[in-house]
Every structure is written in structure tokens, then in C-alpha cells.
Image (spheres, grey):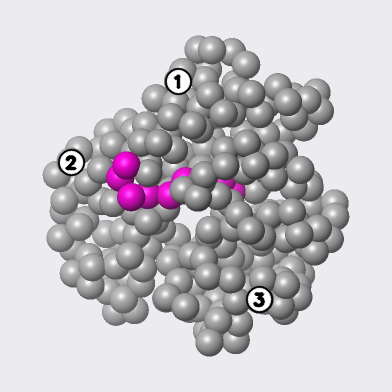
């Protein structure tokens, strides 16, 4: 099992550079919309040069206000343009995978998965072809989903080895209404990445692994050492170190 990736916003890499280099972290770099509005190529090359340990990289795309399955054509057009900005950066930094959100909320779509799916495919099929040409996989992260049916049908319809799931333990713990066994029964074959963090089900707290109520023992037993990218999404250096130490129990 390769070393885990650690989530870090692009604009915080400089602040945490010493910590990153000391621990030789692989990274998941988050690009917010605000960063994408102003980023220049020389900033990317500066970061690449600063990461002297040459880490494995993944990306996390922006998600606030975006709607990959928007019924409104202008909203979807804006969303696709924003997501393509991330792929523009991928042409330079060549991440293994890029995390996107599905934009599915059952009440917003009046429980119509078919409507959401049709518009989703119009977005993801061309984006996936472009990502595959760059050597980057697209992974869709569960967030507000309370069960996995919409994500499963998207995976089935996409039918691409380059397109899969980023399973987020914290979001599952907070929003799911069904046991984790059902999530993995439906999605395990499609999981290409894990987002690993914890909470007490009162908020998306991004605690260290084992500091909340998610049953990691059960989760990793069900995963049965599945080969996928492990990404730590605990949001302080202390929580990152604690998570990495605790993850060893499940991966070594």
C-alpha cells in the first residue's frame, strides 16, 4: 500500500511546506474557485520546484455553487468551464486523480435520479475523456447523499475504468441513513480513492481517524485491503499525524 496523500489547499502549501517536506507527504491539492480566478502558471512551477521530495499528487476541484448536472444550461456551462480549469492545471502537474462532487441533492431534483443522471453524463463524459488523456482519473465524492443509489447508477452508466468513487468516511458518518455495509456493497468495486476523517455526527468536523464515531474497524474489514488511494482529510497538522499513525493499523 502506497503512502497516504494529505489534503492541503493550494494557497496553504507555502505555510506548511516545512511540515510537508519533513514528512515527505504525498498531497491532495485543493483548488478553490478564488484560486482558479487568479492562478498563474509560474505559481504552479514554483510549487513543483518547492516540493523537492517529488510527491505523488491528487487534486480536489472546487464545488461551492457548482452544479455538474444543472438543468439550466447556463449554470452547467459555467460549471464545466470551472472544472476544465482544474484540468488545465492537471496538464502541468499530472495528478493521479481529481476529486469532484456530484451535485446531487434529492430534494433539489425532486427525487428524480434520471433527470440528474442525464445531465450528469453530458458533463462527465467529455471531462473524463480529457482527464484520461492526461493520465488522471476522475473520482466522485459522496457528500450529501444519504444512500448510494445515485452514485452507483452514475458509475454503471459511465462504464469507465478511469471514472470512479472517492468514498468519504466523514460524509458517510454525517449524512448516511443506511449502514456502511450497503454503501460498500453498492460502490466498493468503483472505489478508487478514500477520504479519511471523522466526526461526532453533529457537524463535518474533520477529526483525526478514530476521534469521532465512524467505525473504521468495520469499514476497513469490509474493504479487505482494497488497493486505492488513501487521503487524509483531517484539518490540522496534529490530526494529520494522528490519522497517519492510526491508518497503519489497517494498511500494513
> How many numbered discs sit on the rendered protein?
3
Q: Which structural element holds mark 2?
A: helix
The residue where tag 2 is placed is 41
Q: Describe residue 114's horizontal placement relative to residue 225 as left or right.
A: right
The residue where tag 3 is placed is 224
The residue lying furthest to the right in this view is: 178
Is tag 2's residue or tag 1's residue first in the polypeptide sequence?
Answer: 2
Is tag 1's residue or tag 3's residue first in the polypeptide sequence?
Answer: 1
Cα distance between the residues tagged 2 and 1? 22 Å
Asked whether residue 66 is drawn in magenta, I would say no
Cα distance between the residues tagged 2 and 3? 41 Å
Question: Which residues, given as a range, are shown in magenta?
Answer: 133-141
Say above or below: 110 vs 49.
above
Q: Let me know if residue 125 appears in the view.
A: yes
Residue 228, position as x, y percentages in the image? 51, 66
Q: Of residues 220 and 198, which is closer to you in this image?
A: 220
Residue 111 location, quadrant: top right
Residue at 20% x, 38% y: name it. Answer: 40
Residue 78: assigned label: 1
Cα distance between the residues tagged 1 and 3? 40 Å
Crowd band around label 2 with a 10 angstrom C-alpha radius: few (<14), some (14–19), many (20+): few
Residue 54, position as x, y percentages in the image? 23, 68
Q: Describe residue 28's horizontal placement relative to residue 203 as left or right.
A: left
Say above or below: 123 vs 9.
above
Q: Describe residue 218's horizontal placement relative to residue 88 as left or right.
A: right
Crowd band around label 3 with a 10 angstrom C-alpha radius: few (<14), some (14–19), many (20+): few
Residue 15 location, quadrant: bottom left
Residue at 18% x, 41% y: name it. Answer: 41
Report the mark closest to the observer, 2 or 3.
3
Amino acid at each position: 500500500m502506497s503512502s497516504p496523500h494529505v489534503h492541503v489547499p493550494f494557497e496553504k502549501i507555502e505555510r506548511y511546506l516545512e511540515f510537508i517536506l519533513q514528512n515527505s507527504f504525498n498531497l491532495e491539492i485543493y483548488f478553490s474557485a478564488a484560486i482558479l480566478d487568479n492562478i498563474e502558471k509560474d505559481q504552479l512551477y514554483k510549487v513543483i520546484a518547492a516540493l523537492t521530495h517529488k510527491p505523488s499528487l491528487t487534486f480536489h476541484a472546487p464545488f461551492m455553487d457548482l452544479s455538474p448536472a444543472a438543468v439550466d444550461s447556463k449554470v452547467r456551462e459555467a460549471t464545466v468551464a470551472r472544472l476544465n480549469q482544474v484540468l488545465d492545471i492537471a496538464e502541468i502537474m499530472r495528478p493521479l486523480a481529481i476529486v469532484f462532487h456530484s451535485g446531487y441533492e434529492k430534494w433539489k431534483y425532486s427525487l428524480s435520479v434520471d433527470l440528474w443522471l442525464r445531465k450528469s453524463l453530458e458533463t462527465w463524459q467529455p471531462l473524463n475523456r480529457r482527464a484520461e488523456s492526461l493520465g488522471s482519473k476522475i473520482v466522485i465524492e459522496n457528500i450529501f447523499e444519504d444512500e448510494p443509489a445515485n452514485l452507483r447508477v452514475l458509475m454503471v452508466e459511465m462504464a469507465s475504468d478511469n471514472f470512479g468513487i472517492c468514498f468519504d468516511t466523514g460524509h458517510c458518518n454525517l449524512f448516511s441513513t443506511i449502514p456502511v455495509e450497503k454503501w460498500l456493497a453498492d460502490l466498493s468495486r468503483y472505489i478508487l480513492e478514500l477520504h479519511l476523517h471523522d466526526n461526532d455526527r453533529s457537524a463535518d468536523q474533520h477529526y483525526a481517524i478514530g476521534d469521532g464515531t465512524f467505525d473504521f474497524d468495520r469499514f476497513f474489514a469490509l474493504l479487505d485491503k482494497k488497493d486505492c488511494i488513501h487521503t487524509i482529510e483531517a484539518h490540522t497538522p496534529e490530526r494529520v499525524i494522528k490519522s497517519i499513525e492510526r491508518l497503519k493499523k489497517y494498511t500494513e
